[in-house]
Amino acid sequence: MICQQKTGKKQLKLWTDRLHDAVKLALKSNTSSRSQSMYLIRGRIGQRYTRDGFNSTWSPEQKAAYEAGALPARSRFMI
């Protein structure tokens, strides 16, 4: 269950095998981290990213992946 930031609408998202595997991998990688965290996408000290902090990292990586043909289209990643 997620709550959309802009409208506050609650949405139920279905788990695909690929999403399930990604979450398992993220949780598994958390065990070797110095700081344990409940966040899947987290900064160096285990805290959640701010929207601006995440976008400053995500935007250049997304652009490079799109230009290299690894992404079919530019997309939004909401945190």
Image (tube, rainbow, N blue to C red):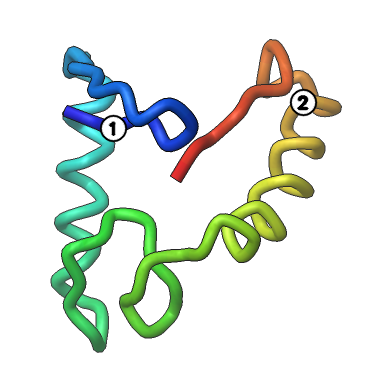
User: Which image quarter: residue 19?
Assistant: top left
From the viewer's perspective, is 9 left or right of 70? left
Q: Is residue 69 above or below residue 77?
A: above
Dot 1 falls on a residue whose secondary structure is: strand
Could you say which is closer to the camera, residue 10 or residue 51?
A: 10
Residue at image location 28% in from the left, 32% down from the top: 3
- Residue 72's disc is none
Q: Is residue 70 above or below residue 26?
A: above
Q: Is residue 57 above or below residue 70?
A: below
Dot 2 falls on a residue whose secondary structure is: helix
User: Which image quarter: residue 47?
Assistant: bottom left
Residue at image location 76% in from the left, 19% down from the top: 69
Task: For label 2, count other residues whose C-alpha is less than 10 Å away and answer few (under 14), some (14-19) or many (20+).
Answer: some
Number of numbered discs on residues: 2
From the viewer's perspective, is 2 left or right of 4? left
According to the image, label 1 marks what residue?
A: 3
Q: Position of residue 17 (x, y in %)?
A: 19, 17
Q: Amino acid at mark 2?
A: Tyr
Q: Amino acid at mark 1?
A: Cys
How far is disc 1 from disc 2 in space, using C-alphas? 28 Å
Task: For label 1, count other residues whose C-alpha is less than 10 Å away and answer few (under 14), some (14-19) or many (20+).
Answer: few
Decide which of tag 1 and tag 2 comes sooner along the chain.
1
From the viewer's perspective, is 9 left or right of 73? left
Q: Position of residue 33 (x, y in %)?
A: 25, 79
User: Which image quarter: residue 38?
Assistant: bottom left
Could you say which is closer to the camera, residue 4 or residue 45?
A: 4
Q: Are marks 1 and 2 in contact (CB under 8 Å)?
A: no
According to the image, label 2 marks what residue?
A: 66
Q: Position of residue 57 (x, y in %)?
A: 67, 58
